[in-house]
């Protein structure tokens, strides 16, 4: 009987932890070109970050909407990964070598 009660209490506690899992949605600008290749590159880079569950980049507005578990990763880490892959974000600029490695259609006008 004690085993059943303990199992039930454990299951209840796991359920509570799952309910309070911290899934967060953020939207921010990511510089890029005007093609589907850019969209694929930005979204795959973003979903490659551990803890990110989805990413949708709008080619026209240059806005990325990302859903992530903020107990696993941070918005800062996501922005840093995107910049390291060649695209500027509000807080990080892409290194020149990463930007230069982008296909020509994905290169955008960089701000000084």
Image: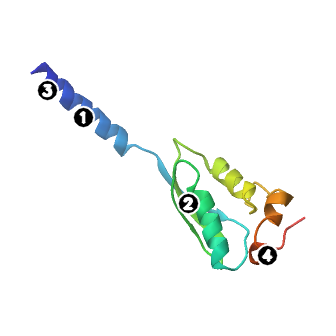
Distance Cα–Cα, label 3 vs label 2 = 41 Å
Distance Cα–Cα, label 4 vs label 3 = 63 Å
Residue 93 is situated, as x and y percent measured from the top left of the image, at: 80, 57
Distance Cα–Cα, label 1 vs label 4 = 53 Å
Q: Secondary structure at mark 3?
A: helix
Q: Is residue 17 left or right of residue 47?
A: left
Residue 39 is situated, as x and y percent measured from the top left of the image, at: 62, 72
**Residue at 59%, 51% in the rendered image:** 49
Q: Nearer the viewer, residue 2 or 48?
A: 48
Residue receiving disc 2: 66
Residue receiving disc 3: 4
The disc, 3 or 2, on the residue closer to the chain's N-terminal end is 3
**Residue at 26%, 30% in the rendered image:** 10
Instruction: Tell me: residue 1, above or below residue 87.
Output: above
Residue receiving disc 4: 104
Instruction: State the residue lying farthest toward the top.
Output: 2
Distance Cα–Cα, label 1 vs label 3 = 10 Å
Q: Secondary structure at mark 2?
A: strand
Residue receiving disc 1: 11
Instruction: State the residue lying farthest toward the left.
Output: 1
Q: Secondary structure at mark 4?
A: helix
Asked if labels 4 and 1 touch by Cβ distance under 8 angstroms, the answer is no
**Residue at 79%, 64% in the rendered image:** 101
């Amino acid at each position: 009987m004690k085993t059943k009660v303990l199992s039930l209490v454990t299951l209840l506690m796991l359920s509570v932890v799952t309910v309070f899992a911290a899934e967060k949605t953020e939207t921010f600008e990511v510089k890029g070109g005007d093609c589907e290749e850019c969209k694929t590159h930005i979204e795959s880079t973003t979903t490659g970050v551990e803890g990110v569950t989805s990413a949708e980049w709008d080619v026209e507005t240059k806005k990325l909407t990302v859903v992530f578990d903020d107990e696993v990763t941070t918005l800062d880490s996501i922005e840093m990964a995107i910049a390291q892959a060649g695209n500027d974000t509000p807080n990080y600029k892409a290194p020149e070598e990463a930007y230069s490695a982008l296909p020509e259609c994905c290169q955008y006008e960089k701000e000084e």
